[in-house]
Amino acid sequence: MATLARHLILCSSSPSQRRRRPLPPDATAGTQQQQQQQAPPQQQPSTTRRLAVAASAALAATATLSARRPAPPPPAMAAEAAVPPTTASPGTVPRWGTRSYVRERFFEPELTAEEAAARIRQTAEGMRTLRPMLETMSWKYVLFYVRLKSKYLGLDLTTAMAGVPAGRRADYVRVANELVDNMTEFDRFVRTPKVYESYLFYEKTLKSLDDVAEFLV
């Protein structure tokens, strides 16, 4: 009986001893390796966030640089600027409007009657290049070009009148005033903008330029 009781005591105490037994070192090392392997995926969101912030900063810098770039010149102005400069000969004038208006208006020598007439003809040629911009409704470029031409036109009309015969000056003044009025109305309707009225006074301006050019032959 004593042997049987001792055997029962040993059997009942062995499970508790097995539960209290510490884990072997190999099992602890394996658990640490699993934790280290699971750690990098937790850092992936922060890495992705840093990449997104860097991409946003690059896009913002690109947008800032593109905004600082100067706007391209109007097509008509670019066409005139592309013409190589040549030495002015009597009766002709180099391409104008491609440099500073203040320099050309106030600091360069005044034009003769023949040079003013040549510049009026260039104005007529330049105004005909506006038709594609009107068709595409590029109002900003049209308005810029018309106002630049108008700055020179009043002075050129007055200067070129010296080359008109005395008997035709009254008709020349009438046609020149019509040209200035049509240019003013064209500027007003482009600024609004109104499509039909802009086309109407554009054609009237071209006709007035042709009428003025007939007096300057």
Image: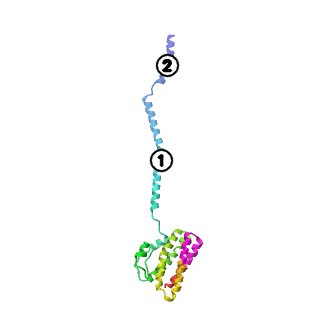
- Check if residue 185 falls in the magenta segment: yes
Above or below, 32 relative to 171: above
Q: Earlier in the sequence, mark 2 or mark 1?
A: 2
Q: Is residue 103 visible?
A: yes
Q: Which numbered mark, 2 or 1, is in the foreground of this view? A: 1
Which secondary structure type mostly characterizes the magenta part of the structure? Answer: helix
Indicate the quadrant where residue 68 lies: bottom left
Residue 72 location in percent, x, y?
47, 67
Q: Secondary structure at mark 1?
A: helix
Q: Give the labeled residue for mark 2.
A: 13
Name the amino acid, label 1.
Arg
For mark 1, does the 10 Å Cα neighbourhood hold few (<14), some (14 to 19), or many (20 or more) residues? few
- The colouring scheme, among rainbow, by chain, secondary structure or one colour, is rainbow
Left or right, residue 200 beside residue 82:
right
Q: Residue at the spot x=53%, y=79% of the render?
A: 179
Indicate the quadrant where residue 91 lies: bottom left
Q: Secondary structure at mark 2?
A: helix
Q: Give the labeled residue for mark 1.
A: 49
Q: Residue at the spot x=55%, y=72% of the render?
A: 188
Compare residues 86 and 199 and report the one nearer the observer. Answer: 199
Above or below, 16 relative to 177: above
Name the amino acid, label 2.
Ser
| Image: magenta residue range | 181-205
Q: CA distance from mark 2 to mark 1?
A: 56 Å
